């Protein structure tokens, strides 16, 4: 399972400009760091009120990474 592709699909479903969604992946053993970059106007949509959507995205990504036996962190820029 490609974790960066899962995050890309989730983000593209949320934002107004899906073509501007970029995910950068850094792998260090079992630790995977994903950096999500979206258009400036879409940042609020990805973060949500009081960070609720961002928290939900992180939880889904942790569950997806758990199936692969990896640990994931998601940073939103």
Image (cartoon, rainbow, N blue to C red):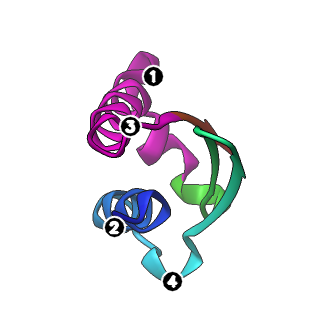
Circles 1 and 3, Cβ within 8 Å, touching? The answer is no
The magenta stretch is: 43-71
Residue shown at 35% from the left, 22% from the top: 52
Q: Earlier in the sequence, mark 1 or mark 3?
A: 1
What is the crowding at mark 3: few (fewer than 14 residues within 10 Å), some, or many (at least 20)?
few
Say the numbered circle drawn on residue 69.
3
| Local secondary structure at mark 2 | helix
Residue shown at 39% from the left, 24% from the top: 55
Real-space CA distance between mark 2 and mark 4, rounded to the nearest whole angstrom: 11 Å
| Residue 44, position as x, y percentages in the image | 51, 41
Q: Nearer the viewer, residue 64 or 17?
A: 64
Q: Which residue is mark 4?
A: 19
Circles 2 and 4, Cβ within 8 Å, touching? The answer is no
Confirm whether the magenta stretch covers residue 60: yes
* Viewer-nearest of discs 2 and 3: 3
User: What residue occupies the far bottom of the structure in this picture?
Assistant: 19
Q: Which residue is mark 1?
A: 51
Real-space CA distance between mark 1 and mark 3, rounded to the nearest whole angstrom: 26 Å
Q: Which residue is mark 2?
A: 9
Q: Give the dominant element type of the magenta stretch: helix, strand or loop.
A: helix
* Viewer-nearest of discs 2 and 4: 2
Real-space CA distance between mark 2 and mark 3, rounded to the nearest whole angstrom: 21 Å
Residue shown at 32% from the left, 58% from the top: 10
> Quick check: 13 above or below 67?
below
């Amino acid at each position: 399972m490609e974790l960066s592709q899962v995050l890309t699909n989730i983000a593209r479903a949320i934002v107004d400009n899906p073509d501007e969604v970029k995910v950068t992946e850094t792998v260090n053993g079992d630790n995977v760091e994903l950096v999500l970059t979206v258009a400036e106007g879409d940042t609020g949509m990805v973060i949500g009120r009081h960070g609720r959507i961002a928290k939900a995205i992180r939880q889904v990504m942790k569950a997806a990474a758990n199936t692969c036996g990896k640990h994931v962190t998601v940073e939103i820029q």
